Amino acid sequence: LNWGSARLDAGSSEEALAILADADAIGPHPLVTRAVGVAHLTRREAGAAAVAFEAALALRPDDGPVMAMLAQAYVDLDR
């Protein structure tokens, strides 16, 4: 998670997604899934971001920032 987040912060969303995919393969974690959503939003991939944020909310339903980012993805998708 930390390595993927660092790559995302450095502006390398493609590398971040690869690293986060490895982390996600270990098992679902809301922070990893959230970071995947952020990476997709950064890449303007609203559909993939929405899927990730929905999964993050399934793991942690009270995560307000994820709700806000999901809302942004829905706006981008005209939903």
Image: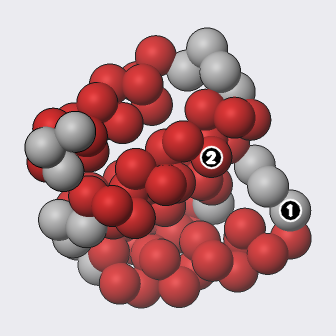
**Number of residues whose C-alpha sits closer than 10 Å to that of mark 1, classed few (under 14), some (14–19) or many (20 or more):** few
Residue 31 visible to the viewer: no
Look at the picture and state if 50 lies above or below 69. below
Tell me the residue at 26%/58% (across/down).
Answer: 46
Badge number at residue 18 = none
Q: What is the three-letter code of the residue carrying label 1?
A: Gly
- Horizontally, residue 54 falls left or right of residue 79, namely right
Q: Is 79 in front, or is 71?
A: 79
Q: Residue furthest front?
A: 79
Q: Is 45 in front, or is 6?
A: 45
Tell me the residue at 63%/77% (across/down).
Answer: 21
Look at the picture and state if 69 lies above or below 41. above
**Number of residues whose C-alpha sits closer than 10 Å to that of mark 2, classed few (under 14), some (14–19) or many (20 or more):** some
Q: Secondary structure at mark 2?
A: helix
Q: Earlier in the sequence, mark 1 or mark 2?
A: 1
- Horizontally, residue 41 falls left or right of residue 5, namely left
- Horizontally, residue 17 falls left or right of residue 74, namely right
Residue, disc 2: 55
Residue 49 occupies which quadrant of the picture? bottom left
Look at the picture and state if 76 lies above or below 19. above
Tell me the residue at 79%/75% (across/down).
Answer: 25
Look at the picture and state if 75 lies above or below 41. above
Residue 56 occupies which quadrant of the picture? top right
Tell me the residue at 53%/85% (across/down).
Answer: 18
Q: Secondary structure at mark 1?
A: loop
Which numbered mark, 1 or 2, is in the foreground of this view?
Answer: 2
Residue, disc 1: 27
- Pointer 1 and pointer 2: residues touching (CB < 8 Å)? no
- Residue 65: x and y in percent read 41, 24
Q: Quadrant of the N terminus?
A: bottom right
> Coloring scheme of the render?
secondary structure
- Horizontally, residue 69 falls left or right of residue 63, namely left
